[in-house]
């Protein structure tokens, strides 16, 4: 967790107090400061054995420690850059290029970020953020495929996502739209009723405004739903 904490703050100073908070949360040992020094020493040795021959990856500063990449790649940065590229293509109507960028971004996600170690406040926050970014990227992939008219490709994907994330209304919205555009209006309406039942049971809430509007548009076969960028 020492390395993970330094990685998520790479290029910025991490104080000793922050490291203690991530390593032991609210119950640090009496000699937590000494233990941090030991962990950092062990980490430096590991990094040297892994290729940091000058031992400069972790710099000691007056107020803490800083991890430096020295030109090494960082999947998080690449992921964010690809999302930005994909969004730009999407807004310009270049949906094939957008889809390629989004799919390349998802290939960088090899599993849950910090799986099994995200217990401290900063690590928990970055793990939550990473999962939200991944789901957002999946939504963008679906939007790009939908804009390209490839509706049937995403139906099974969206059904699985709804099963896994039953409170994420955007997946219901996307599934309703692609079912409607696949000439499966009745199924699209059943998806809305399912979302309504889940949200009422779990949260005591009605579906969000955009989901209700889409439901009404499907009921009336609104011609706007036939436009490539409708959502």
Image (spheres, helix red, strand yellow):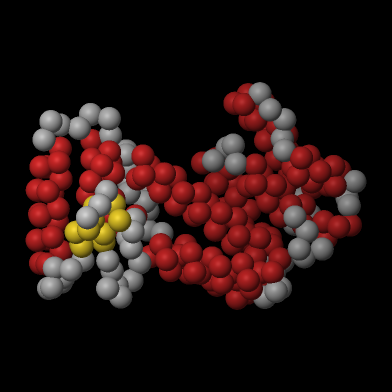
Let me know if residue 197 appears in the view.
no
Q: Position of residue 68 (x, y in %)?
A: 27, 66
Instruction: Judge whether 165 appears above or below 100 on screen.
Output: above
Which residue occupies 14% across, 53% down? 40
Q: Nearer the viewer, residue 89 or 159?
A: 89
How many marks are shown on the rendered structure?
0
Residue extending furthest toward the front: 62
Q: Nearer the viewer, residue 17 or 81?
A: 17
Which residue occupies 10% across, 55% down? 41
Q: Position of residue 4 (x, y in %)?
A: 27, 52
Q: Viewed as shown, does residue 103 lie left or right of 152?
A: left
Q: Viewed as shown, does residue 82 lie left or right of 74?
A: right
Let me know if residue 28 appears in the view.
yes
Which residue occupies 66% across, 69% down? 90
Q: Position of residue 14 (x, y in %)?
A: 29, 52
The image quadrant of residue 78 is bottom left
Q: Quadrant of the C terminus?
A: bottom right
Which residue occupies 60% across, 60% down? 140
Q: Nearer the viewer, residue 231 or 146?
A: 231
The image quadrant of residue 7 is bottom left
Q: Position of residue 170 (x, y in %)?
A: 65, 47
Q: Viewed as shown, does residue 192 lie left or right of 51?
A: right
């Amino acid at each position: 967790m020492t390395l993970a904490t330094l990685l998520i703050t790479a290029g910025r100073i991490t104080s000793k107090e922050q490291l203690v908070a991530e390593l032991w949360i609210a119950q640090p040992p009496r000699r937590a400061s000494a233990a941090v020094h030991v962990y950092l020493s062990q980490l430096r040795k590991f990094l040297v054995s892994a290729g940091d021959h000058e031992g400069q990856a972790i710099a000691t500063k007056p107020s803490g420690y800083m991890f430096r990449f020295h030109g090494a790649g960082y999947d998080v940065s690449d992921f964010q850059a690809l999302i930005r590229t994909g969004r730009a293509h999407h807004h310009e109507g270049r949906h094939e290029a957008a889809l390629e960028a989004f799919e390349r971004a998802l290939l960088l996600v090899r599993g849950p970020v910090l799986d099994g170690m995200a217990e401290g406040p900063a690590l928990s926050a970055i793990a939550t953020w990473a999962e939200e970014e991944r789901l957002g990227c999946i939504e963008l992939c679906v939007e790009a495929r939908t804009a390209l008219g490839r509706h049937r490709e995403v139906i099974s994907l969206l059904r699985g996502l709804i099963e896994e994330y039953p409170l994420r209304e955007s997946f219901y919205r996307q599934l309703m739209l692609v079912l409607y555009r696949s000439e499966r209006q009745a199924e699209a309406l059943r998806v809305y009723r399912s979302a309504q039942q889940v949200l009422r049971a779990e949260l005591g809430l009605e579906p969000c405004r955009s989901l209700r509007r889409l439901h009404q548009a499907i009921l009336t076969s609104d011609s706007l739903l036939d436009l490539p960028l409708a959502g």
